[in-house]
Image (cartoon, rainbow, N blue to C red):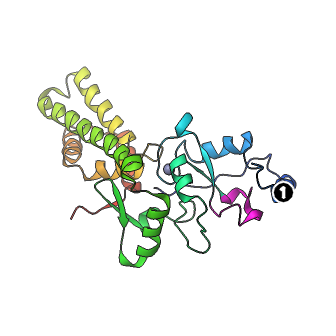
Amino acid sequence: MIKVERIDKPKELTDDIQRQLTDEFKKDKKKQVWNKSYIRRELLKECHGKCVYCESLIGEGHKEMHIDHFHYKDKYKDEVVSWENLNPSCPHCNKSKSSHDTYAEPIINPFEQNPQDYFCIKHYRYYSKNSEVEEIARRTIGVLELNDTENVVMLRFKVGEALIQEIQDICEFAIENKDILCSKTVKRNRVLRGCRNILKKGTRDAEYAAFMSSIIMGDSYYKKLKELLKELNLWDDELQELDEEVDKIKLQRNED
Ligand SMILES: [Zn+2]
């Protein structure tokens, strides 16, 4: 989970329309008044195509976007189409959260709070960062099932381990060709492209960015690769910008 920013509500969702839809819902709770194409369109833009909770990519079928009402709609009917209450999520997180009452028992809302202040990670799992935030961090993990082995942890493991392998491969290739990297364009391009691709997997648009950014920044092969490129004067502005972006969103790792 990473901090996400709320964008402006769709222009179609005027105050009048909002009132009208809320009244419709109050009369008939089965009516999915929030399920409008203009709402879905803006939500998808807002979340960069990812669940705001677990950061899995939103797609078709079982990966389809669900619209989560942060404050449960059956109880807090006035917020049924309130833009600040609509969180784009995946089916897993939305179903796990279900009718949890976020006023009575608050959980972290990545639009409001920065997950970096609450979580640390270890072995593809979330933990509370410290004892002060333990209650809300643990509750958030439990309510959203963020450490569900089969549905979430294994998926993070798969992309994380592939990334670790990719970093090692590019780094070893760079070391083997160290003496000719400056003169051989094809080999140099391969290393620079490889390094950019690695970093892009840890930026805020990437799947499981909280984990991927932490993996990259903590990886000893990545550190070696970066040092080597700097030594050869091949570390450019684009790589520097990507590196800073990845570093900014990483979560604290707790590997003890
Ligand atoms: Zn999710």
> What's drawn in magenta, residue-wise?
70-85
Q: Is residue 122 left or right of residue 84?
A: left
> Residue 9 in the image: x percent, y percent?
72, 51
Question: Is-magenta flag for residue 175?
Answer: no
> Residue 54 in the image: x percent, y percent?
46, 52
Return the residue nearer the eye: 28 or 36.
Answer: 28
Task: Residue at 39%, 56% (x, y): give it.
Answer: 147
Q: Is residue 149 above or below residue 26?
A: above
Task: Residue at 39%, 65% (x, y): give it.
Answer: 119
SS type, badge 1 = helix
Identify the residue position indicated by label 1 in the image: 15
Q: Is residue 193 above or below residue 109?
A: above
Q: Is residue 229 above or below residue 191?
A: below
Is ligand 1 less than 8 Å from the beta carbon at label 1?
Answer: no
Q: Is residue 45 left or right of residue 31?
A: left
Mark 1: amino acid = Asp
Q: Is residue 19 left or right of residue 112?
A: right
Question: Is-magenta flag for residue 79?
Answer: yes
- Residue 5 found in image quarter: bottom right
